[in-house]
Amino acid sequence: MTVKLIATIAAVSGAPLLAQTTALAKAADGIMLGSWNTQVEFDDANVVCGKNVVLNDSFDAQVSSWVPEGGVWLVTNGVLRQTSSATPALTRFTFKNPATNYTVLVRAKKLGGAEGFLVGFGARDSENYYWLNLGGWNNTAAALEKSLDGERSPVGTRVGEVIETGRWYALKIEVTGQRIQCFVDGRRIIDLTDAGFGKGDSAVLPPDNDKLNFGRALIPDMVADPSIVDIDGTFYCYATTDGWGQGLATSGTPVVWQSKDFRNWSFEGSSFPADFDLKYWAPSTVVHKNGRYYSFPTLDGKITAVVADSPLGPFVAPDGRHVTKATLRPFPIEQKSTIDAEVFIDDDGQAYVVWSRRRMVKLKPDLLSPDGPLINLPTKREGYSEGPFLTKRNGIYYYFYTLGGNEAYQYAYMMSRTSPLGPWETPEQDIIATTDHAEKVFGPGHGCFFHPQGSDQWYFVYLEYGRGGTTRQIYADKMNFNPDGTIQPVKLTKTGVGALRPTTNSSPNLALDARATASSVRPNSRVRPRSDRSLDRVETFAPANALDDFNGTRWLAAAGDSNAWFQVDLGVPRDIRRTEAYFVKPAAGHAYRLEWSLDGATWQPYGGHEDVILRSPHRDEKTVRARYLKLTILEGEPGLWEFRIYGESGQLTK
């Protein structure tokens, strides 16, 4: 259906807002009514698309199509009333309409509270929408705002606005293609164009768009702050689990990724006991000492020592207690802006820990407390710094530290030929990693520096800006040294370094030549820049992304798809012996059903499970001759980073 959005808007002073950008049209989708720390009433809500009336609600009765998303809502005396002080209080009316010309009309009255009204439109889902904010900023202004993947930002500039209590306002929003006009009591206060949410961008994107922008990420998941160590022939990656949709207010389940070859990675379950309930950020590289493995993650914003009998965990407190909010005992240093710990043990057995803002202490032999005063490291470059790393090569000590953040993240270093305590020298070329626009690498930040056992080839593993905020992925590139020990600037790429040891998957992946379809596809999403306006990144979610052998691309089902499925057509019947499903958001767990077919009509069970299991990949083994495979997601995020199909039994990563 075609929707024309007209929303009645509170009286506003000042000239109309004017802005111009090249843009793609926005579809109507849904509308929202709401408030921010304010009690309000709404009446006569209408959505009109050309001659089609999509919504005409005078609130004479409770209508189930309105879905509250915060606040206390009640239909009473012919109005829709919101009585709480929620921030925000919202209710949504959802519809689907391909039209880009529509009008939203509504009347609104303030009953009490600090601000005014929110009228949302173009509301594709709970994270992607526009809203007209009237009487915002402590009842001083009005502005149009857009939420893109949950991050809200202004469109245009504010105009002065005060909403009076007890007065009805007629609000109107008109959307005509790329143009958005907002009216209060018949007076236009906003007139601008905007690019929407990227819907329709696929028509102008290059065919390798996602590969160029997201590339061969090391891990098939959103992770950040990696620390990697090679122990007895196995690579272990400790990292922040990203992509849980609430920014720094949360973190995903802590897991340990492992790989035999540095190319095929897996994890099984949480690395902490089941009662772990803390935010888990930036775990350090594990060190083995005193018969145990030590790690120093940031838990609820505080650096904390944890131990385990295995590099995979489960990690507990040094005294054996489970680590929870009730039992948390931070590391005994001043816990003030203390994040991102890394531990280094020198050849003589002396251990050191470094953390954010250029701080370091020596550690006692048990690694559980400082052995001496706090040391402030004297770097050449000033400003906020995190993600430090201390290591040694050929008798030279290297201290790495970050500068900036987001797209401006970069790494600098200094070196000492004497001791981790200095004296330190700064090479002329001390920035070794920074944004490379040609390679589409933005903000190479918090990472690690390591070399595999038995090799003098070093690698830099780092997070990249990704989709913005806490939606990052990690990448690996070679790091090379000059004869004098100084470091060459790292050539950043998104192609990866490949397998560092013989691959664990020796048989061919039949899915690479296959065709994928799905129950639905999420609309394209444009990544919002924060500091570098040259960032021009759109993510698509086509089913083919899950068959391209690139960990940075993915298929996602559309929001609201309650029966999401993904299907592979091999073209002709093939002998299949094993599959691997790398789900999106795997640390939250998945349940699924996997079936096979020769004709795409008659299906037989192949694998899967009904219980929710935290792992990646999910492997199924069964010898069949099939042309089609169909995976139905029963629980968990409806998406795949990769789906692999093997026709011969190969060595499995344990």
Image (spheres, rainbow, N blue to C red):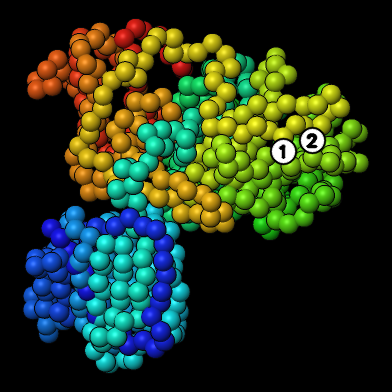
In the image, residue 165 sits, relative to residue 471, either above or below, namely below
* Rendering coords of residue 292 (x, y %): 64, 28
Using the rendered view, name the quadrant where residue 490 is placed: top right
Closer mark to the observer between disc 1 and disc 2:
1
543 lies left or right of 562? right
- Residue closest to the eye, 256 or 460: 460
Residue matched to label 2: 398
Residue matched to label 1: 432
Question: What residue sits 81% from the left and 26% below the top?
Answer: 482
Question: What residue sits 63% from the left and 48% below the top?
Answer: 409
**Does the rendering let one see residue 246?**
yes
Question: What residue sits 40% from the left and 28% below the top?
Answer: 616
Q: Label 2's element?
A: strand
* Rendering coords of residue 510 (x, y %): 32, 15
572 lies left or right of 411? left
Using the rendered view, name the quadrant where residue 566 is placed: top left
Specify the label residue 606 is tagged with: none
Kind of residue at disc 2: Tyr
In the image, residue 367 sits, relative to residue 654, either above or below, namely below
Kind of residue at disc 1: Ile
- Residue closest to the eye, 391 or 205: 205
